Image (spheres, grey):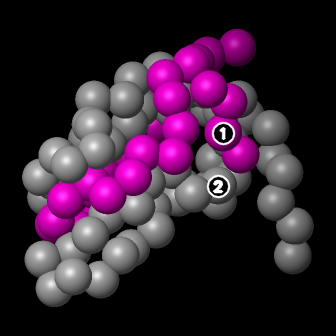
Amino acid sequence: MSVVEEVVFSPYSGTVETVLTEERNHVYEWERLFLIKTKSGKIEEISIGISGYITSLPVKKGQVVNTHTVLATIQDDMIITGSD
């Protein structure tokens, strides 16, 4: 079985308001991972449609990010948990 790692990029430019997980944590599909305060002042929630383990978490609270910034890397556990 191959290992699949997914890179999570910031969909917004702004400042990391909150990091809601830690490296090596297991996260679930659509779990909130980050809150980003955009340049317009709106707080945006960041989540991803896979579950797995955080293998890298290179951002910290207060860090300025843009759409090229890697927020996290997640090793997909390949377990489908969503529902209709």
User: Relative to 22, is 68 on the left or the right?
Assistant: left
Estimate how packed mark 2 is, as few (under 14), some (14 to 19) or many (20 or more) residues with alpha carbons within 10 Å: some
Q: Residue under circle 1?
A: 27
Q: Which residues are magenta?
A: 1-28
Q: CA distance from mark 2 to mark 1?
A: 7 Å
Kindly indicate the quadrant of the structure image that contains residue 43: bottom left
**Residue 13 vertical position relative to residue 57 in the rendered view, above or below:** below
Secondary structure state at the residue bearing disc 1: strand
Q: Amino acid at mark 2?
A: Glu
Q: Quadrant of residue 70?
A: top left
Q: Is residue 46 visible?
A: yes
12 magenta-colored: yes
State the image coordinates of residue 58 (x, y, percent, origin top left). Answer: 28, 29
Name the spot of residue 42 as percent of width and height, x first.
Answer: 29, 83
In the depicted structure, whether residue 66 falls above or below residue 37: above
Residue 55: percent from the left, percent from the top? 47, 20
Amino acid type at circle 1 is Val
Identify the residue under disc 2.
Answer: 31
The answer to the question of whether label 2 and label 1 lie on touching residues, with beta carbons closer than 8 A, is yes
The quarter of the picture where the N terminus appears is top right
Which residue is depicted at the point 12% across and 77% down? 39
Q: With 44 as the anchor, is 67 left or right in this view?
A: left
Vertical placement of residue 15 versus 25, above or below: below
